[in-house]
Image: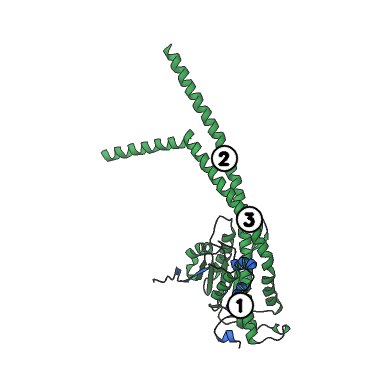
Amino acid sequence: MTAWRAAGLTYIQFSNIAARVLRQALKPNLRADALKREDSHVKFTPWKDGKPITEKA
Amino acid sequence: MLGRGGLVAIAAAQSGGQQVRGMATLKTISLRLKSVKNIQKITQSMKMVSAAKYARAERDLKAARPIGEGSVTFYEKAEVQEVGEKPEKLIVALTSDRGLCGAVHTSVARQIRNELCESPDNIKVICVGDKSRAILQRLYGKNIAVVANEVGRKPPTFLDAAKIAQQITQHSFSSGKIVYNKFKSVVSYNTSELPLFSESAISAAPKLSVYDSLDADVIQSYVEFSMASLVFYAMKEGACSEQSSRMTAMDNASKNAAEMIDKLTLTFNRTRQAVITRELIEIISGAAALE
């Protein structure tokens, strides 16, 4: 059992953190491009019985 | 009595109005012409934009292809089969938020709809992109488990795929698949499927022994990674097909607009001539009456 899995991370979370650190360590001319690959805007809404579950309900 | 008379009067006025509307006046034609020209401008610039985006998407896709193929080959080589007594299916619909791109979203949704039509029980759908949600929610809203939006504004990143994979792993399923559009060429795409397997299915694969030095930890990590990379690859394929399809759709729209403009210009000129001729006749006959 690796340390990161013991901490409750999945492999994807672990590798994303590693990738983020690597991107921050790049030289400035390469970093700008690499940082563009880091953003993510996906939003999730759980659904139940044909309706989205909003935070209010 | 009076009321009925009023109704008749209104009806007469309406039919009169209809006639005026039906007869193309110079003003209405020129307004119509102007609006069609504006639409053509919009579709043309949308075509340009999507052409640029398409070029980038195709470049990205080339880089992403090996990532997806690696996972697929693993599933094939290890002959992974679905396990589990109760058949719980999970379908991931990969579309985007944006329309005006031909039938890419509809064909993904149609494939899923056909499946849901046969047996709507025990199938959960994860809709990626508002478009698949909009199509599926009316008839099969009960099957939708999660909706992901804000997809398709920018090219998909691995982080997006990782988040979606995270959502997928939160649902238990015995067999799953990703429905996406596989990019073939600028003018064509295939709606295809990628299999998804749970960890237990992979551990029970009959030919897993062709791979050596595997333990439960490695398999677990690999399942997580392969899930994300499959989603990533499918997203790239989807984005590329979407942009190429939008390009063709906008090209067709511009062509149709050009056709309409030609026809409208012709009617416009004809009507203008007719108006001039009528005025001339009126003036001449007026002058003739005075003599």
Residue B62 on image: x %, y %: 69, 65
Q: Quadrant of the C terminus of chain B?
A: top left
Q: Chain of mark 3?
A: B
Residue holding disc 3: B52
Amino acid, disc 3: Ala
The part of the image, by quadrant, that contains residue B180 is: bottom right
Q: Is residue B239 left or right of residue B147?
A: right
Front one among B55 and B241: B55
Most extreme residue toward the right is: B210
Q: Is residue B122 above or below residue B45?
A: below
* SS at mark 3 in the image: helix
- Chain ID for green: B
Q: Is residue B137 left or right of residue B218?
A: left
Q: CA distance from mark 3 to mark 2?
A: 27 Å
- Chain ID for blue: A
Amino acid, disc 1: Ala
Q: Residue at x 62, y 53 (%)?
A: B247
* SS at mark 1 in the image: helix
Q: Residue at x 53, y 73 (%)?
A: B123
Most extreme residue toward the front is: A28
